[in-house]
């Protein structure tokens, strides 16, 4: 009977372990910014001079490869300038990788440089492909090993032609289970665009065929009804629905949260134009130009209006570029509570959107008074964003990558987990223990009942 009891308990434990693994060991593949899809037109953006947008030269990413992995695998999508998704072929993007074992941008050990046009670096003579991935695969460097055993890096993407009228769009992907990718916080705003660009006319047509695949198959008699891109049965159906999703990690106690949006082109052309969509002067945004801004291309925050106005683009007879209604965004806290900015920035200006726990702070100090600023992963949900409209974000927290399903991927830690006298099981571990105990009790009860029945029969 002891042997039967042991078998039942062992079976219970294995079953519970399987139950636990089904919840706690879900594999996550790859981490991407801004998305993993190659056909949704969502891109990170570098803009050049004289294009009615901000000009920034540098964007720094944190890259992580889990302990035990032999190689680091980074993919750059459309890393060149020109062809599909870009407006000129005269620009050059450069990508440099450094070991950063502390995960805080202080690492300076260089591991390699690659250029979009193949003019220099480790890919000299081998330019990055248009509308495709360029693979960077290197052995995980011992200089990048953190205390935790994870391998941490920083990758600097640099626009080498900021003085040129160039728009260069690209995506970044880190391949493999348990990898991570994020944009470092601080004074480095970044641009993003739902792009429909091509350095030549045929490139633009090819991009349109990707954005509107059903129209490309049968353009005859296509109904240009605004908004029908949401309907898969419509010839103007598109994988881009006007939304962008970013996530950031709040890992500290705070009483307020600052978030800056720039050049969203909310509203109508002039401040004198009629409502309902009209940019207004934001009372809690400090006057003048922010210290982090691109001064030559930035307007002081005001009620200047949009250029071009949202939902009204020139040469768009089929309403193919617009995504109504007017652009807005929400910050959604880890508990699912949304805080919406219903009047974001207009033309080439920055506006502060602040959540604050100070009683009575709105509207002169903060935008929305909140009860608390919970720690965890926050969701930035942008809606109604037209194509061709380059927008900017300046955040104080890590903008973290997403997996192929669009789910946020937390960054890998540089530190070992804290050691303490009391280890509290996780929810899934509690589940395993509870199931094991429950099945064990049932097993013992069954054996006793069987023994009782056997004694009675004797």
Image: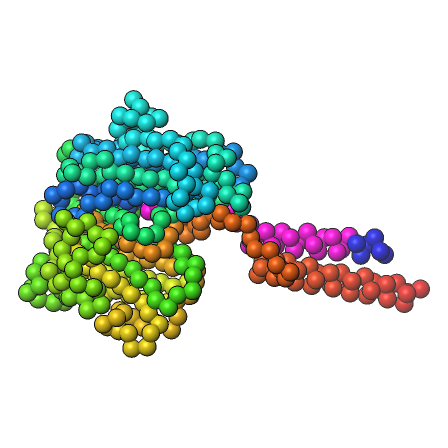
Magenta-colored stretch includes residue 368? no
Q: Residue 201: where, in percent of width, then height?
A: 14, 34
The residue sitting at 15% across, 33% down in the picture is 200
| Left or right: 307, with 44 as reference point | left
Magenta-colored stretch includes residue 33? yes
Looking at the rendering, which quadrant does residue 50 occupy?
top left
The residue sitting at 39% across, 41% down in the picture is 154
Q: What range is drawn magenta here?
A: 7-34
Residue lying at the far top in this picture: please name it: 125
User: Would residue 178 be seen by someone viewing this image from the given angle?
Assistant: yes
Question: Which quadrant of the rendered structure holds the N terminus?
Answer: bottom right
Q: Nearer the viewer, residue 74 or 291?
A: 291
The residue sitting at 34% across, 52% down in the picture is 185
Q: Is 134 rendered above or below residue 309?
A: above
Question: Which quadrant of the rendered structure holds the C terminus?
Answer: bottom right
Residue lying at the far bottom in this picture: please name it: 360
Taken as a whole, is the magenta stretch helix, strand or loop? Answer: helix
| Left or right: 163, with 135 as reference point | left
Q: Residue 142: where, in percent of width, then height?
A: 50, 35
| Left or right: 314, with 106 as reference point | left
């Amino acid at each position: 009977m002891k042997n039967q009891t042991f078998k039942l308990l062992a079976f219970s434990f294995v079953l519970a372990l399987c139950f636990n693994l089904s919840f706690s060991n879900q594999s996550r593949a790859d981490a991407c910014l801004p998305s993993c899809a190659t056909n949704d037109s969502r891109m990170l953006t570098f803009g050049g001079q004289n294009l009615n947008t901000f000009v920034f030269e540098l964007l720094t990413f944190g890259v992580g490869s889990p302990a035990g992995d032999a190689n680091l695998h980074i993919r750059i999508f459309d890393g060149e300038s020109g062809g599909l998704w870009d407006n000129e072929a005269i620009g050059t993007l450069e990508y440099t990788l450094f070991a950063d074992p502390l995960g805080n941008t202080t690492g300076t050990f260089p591991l390699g440089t690659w250029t979009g046009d193949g003019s220099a670096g480790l890919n000299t003579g081998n330019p990055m492909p248009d509308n495709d991935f360029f693979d960077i695969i290197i052995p995980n460097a011992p200089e990048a090993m953190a205390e935790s055993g994870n391998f941490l890096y920083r990758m600097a993407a640099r626009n080498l032609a900021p003085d040129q009228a160039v728009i260069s769009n690209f995506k970044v992907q880190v391949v493999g289970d348990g990898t991570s990718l994020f944009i470092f916080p601080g004074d480095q705003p970044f641009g993003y665009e739902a792009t429909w660009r091509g350095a030549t006319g045929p490139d633009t047509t090819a991009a349109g065929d990707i954005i509107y695949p059903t129209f490309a198959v049968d353009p005859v008699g296509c109904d240009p009804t605004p908004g029908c891109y949401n309907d898969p049965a419509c010839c103007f159906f598109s994988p881009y629905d006007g939304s962008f999703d970013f996530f950031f990690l709040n890992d500290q106690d705070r009483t307020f949260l600052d978030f800056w949006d720039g050049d969203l082109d909310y509203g109508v052309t002039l401040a004198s134009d009629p409502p309902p969509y009209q940019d207004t002067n934001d009372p809690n945004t400090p006057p003048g130009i922010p210290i982090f801004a691109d001064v030559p291309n930035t307007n002081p925050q005001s009620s200047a209006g949009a250029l071009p106005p949202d939902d009204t683009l020139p040469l768009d007879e089929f309403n193919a570029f617009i995504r109504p209604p007017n652009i807005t965004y929400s910050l959604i806290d880890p508990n699912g509570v949304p805080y919406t900015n219903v009047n974001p920035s207009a033309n080439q200006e920055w506006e502060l959107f602040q959540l604050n726990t100070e009683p009575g702070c709105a509207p002169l100090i903060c935008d929305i008074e909140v009860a608390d600023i919970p720690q965890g992963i926050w969701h930035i949900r942008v809606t109604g964003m037209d194509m061709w409209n380059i927008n900017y974000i300046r955040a104080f927290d890590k903008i973290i990558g997403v997996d192929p399903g669009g789910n946020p991927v937390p960054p890998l830690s540089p530190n070992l987990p804290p050691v303490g006298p009391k280890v509290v099981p996780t929810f899934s571990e509690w589940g395993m223990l509870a199931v094991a105990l429950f099945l064990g009790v049932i097993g013992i009860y069954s054996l006793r009942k069987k023994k009782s029945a056997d004694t009675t029969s004797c």
